């Protein structure tokens, strides 16, 4: 019985071969079915694979593997595409070490959307949270899908903000698609499955091993036209994503931060090394407009409620960033009691929210 190329690729991926090794084996064997009958000695002579992988290849039963994968596909609503599939994302075809297999849940049609990656620290400051929400909301207004990694912190904020504002979002996992990591993001995972796209190059039951995450970061940048780094420490995973983006010829954008903050060391370093400093969404759009056709999305969420003159003046102040109520009073010239009562009304209307006691930002 012969197997199609896709089935052999799925089998090789399942037993632990990375995409580079799979690609090199494809180039060695004119007929991929020959891979199934090669001896251990011949595999050793090729000099491509380590002993553990060779042992798995000669001991693994492809029929059992495919049956297991197809059962998962049916019971867990998993889609599978390979490098041969017409659905394979266009942007990934042009990167080195492109994934051979992608498992997915959700709407695969959005995988070729114009997109930008937003990544950053797992422990953002209030400044980082505010900036992530601000840039995410403004970027989806231009029909840009938000790509991130479903991790704690900036990733989670970016995904949630995109969904809350009717935008598209794509989560790239560092584990199998049957594994939710971190577990606290179960609700977010379900929301993305229903309203966006989740993908992974790892076989469905792969655990979130530490070494998987740097590997998946090339997919985050590969899918995107650019990478925005919000806050990052030195040597963080976000900087790995930024380096992948540079190697792939993608734009890298970095949010400047306090020189005394650990969480701005990485972003400030990126700027020092040539990343685009961003102070507003227009800094990103100016670069992306050279490679993408961007149109304002009138369906994106906007605060379309009617505001009084006083409410509008306070809202306008908060558009530039979070402010303490005392500073709002100082800048607006309004009595502090009027400011506080107006902020309460704006909160009820869903226009502003309190980040931390007495400090407010727009929703």
Image (cartoon, helix red, strand yellow):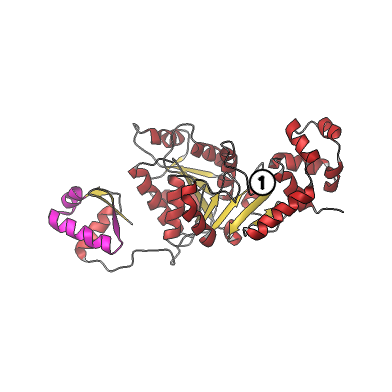
Indicate the secondary structure of the residue bearing disc 1.
loop
Residue 107: % across, % down: 58, 61
Q: Is residue 261 left or right of residue 356?
A: right
Q: Is residue 127 left or right of residue 221?
A: left
In the rendered image, the quadrant that contains the N terminus is: bottom right
Magenta range: 325-354
- Residue under the point 82% across and 40% down: 28
Residue nearest the observer in this picture, 11 or 196: 11
- Residue under the point 70% across and 45% down: 14
Write down the quadrant of residue 154 in the picture: top left
Residue 35: % across, % down: 83, 43
Q: Residue furthest bottom?
A: 306
Q: Is residue 177 magenta?
A: no
- The residue indicated by pointer 1 is 99
Residue 38: % across, % down: 86, 39
Q: Is residue 330 left or right of residue 317?
A: left
| Magenta highlight: main SS | helix
Q: How many marks?
A: 1
Can residue 175 be seen in this snapshot?
yes
């Amino acid at each position: 019985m012969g197997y199609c190329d896709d089935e052999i690729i799925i089998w090789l991926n399942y037993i632990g071969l990375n995409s580079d090794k799979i690609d090199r084996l494809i180039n060695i064997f004119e007929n991929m079915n020959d891979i199934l009958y090669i001896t251990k000695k011949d595999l050793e002579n090729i000099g491509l694979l380590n002993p553990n992988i060779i042992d798995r290849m000669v001991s693994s039963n492809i029929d059992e593997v495919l049956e297991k994968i197809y059962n998962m596909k049916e019971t867990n609503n998993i889609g599978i595409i390979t490098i041969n599939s017409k659905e394979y994302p266009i942007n990934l075809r042009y990167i080195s070490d492109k994934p051979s297999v992608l498992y997915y849940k959700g709407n695969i049609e959005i995988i070729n959307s114009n997109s930008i990656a937003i990544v950053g620290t797992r422990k953002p400051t209030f400044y980082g949270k505010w900036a992530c929400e601000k840039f995410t909301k403004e970027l989806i207004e231009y029909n840009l899908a938000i790509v991130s990694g479903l991790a704690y912190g900036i990733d989670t904020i970016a995904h949630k903000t995109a969904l809350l504002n009717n935008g598209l979002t794509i989560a790239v996992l560092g584990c199998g698609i049957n594994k939710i990591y971190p577990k606290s993001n179960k609700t977010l995972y379900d929301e993305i499955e229903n309203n966006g796209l989740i993908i992974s190059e790892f076989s469905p039951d792969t655990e979130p091993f530490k070494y998987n995450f740097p590997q998946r970061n090339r997919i985050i940048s590969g899918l995107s036209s650019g990478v925005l780094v919000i806050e990052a420490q030195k040597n963080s995973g976000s900087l790995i994503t930024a380096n992948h983006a540079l190697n792939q010829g993608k734009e890298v954008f970095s949010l400047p931060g306090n020189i005394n903050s650990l969480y701005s060391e990485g972003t400030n370093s990126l700027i020092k090394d040539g990343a685009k400093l961003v102070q507003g969404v227009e800094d990103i759009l100016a670069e992306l407009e050279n490679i993408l056709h961007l149109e304002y999305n009138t369906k994106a969420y906007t605060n379309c409620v009617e505001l009084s003159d006083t409410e509008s003046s306070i809202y306008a102040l908060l558009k530039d960033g979070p402010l303490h109520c005392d500073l709002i009073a100082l800048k607006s010239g309004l009595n502090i009691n009027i400011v506080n009562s107006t902020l309460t009304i704006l909160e009820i209307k869903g226009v502003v929210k309190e980040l931390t006691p007495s400090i407010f930002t727009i929703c």
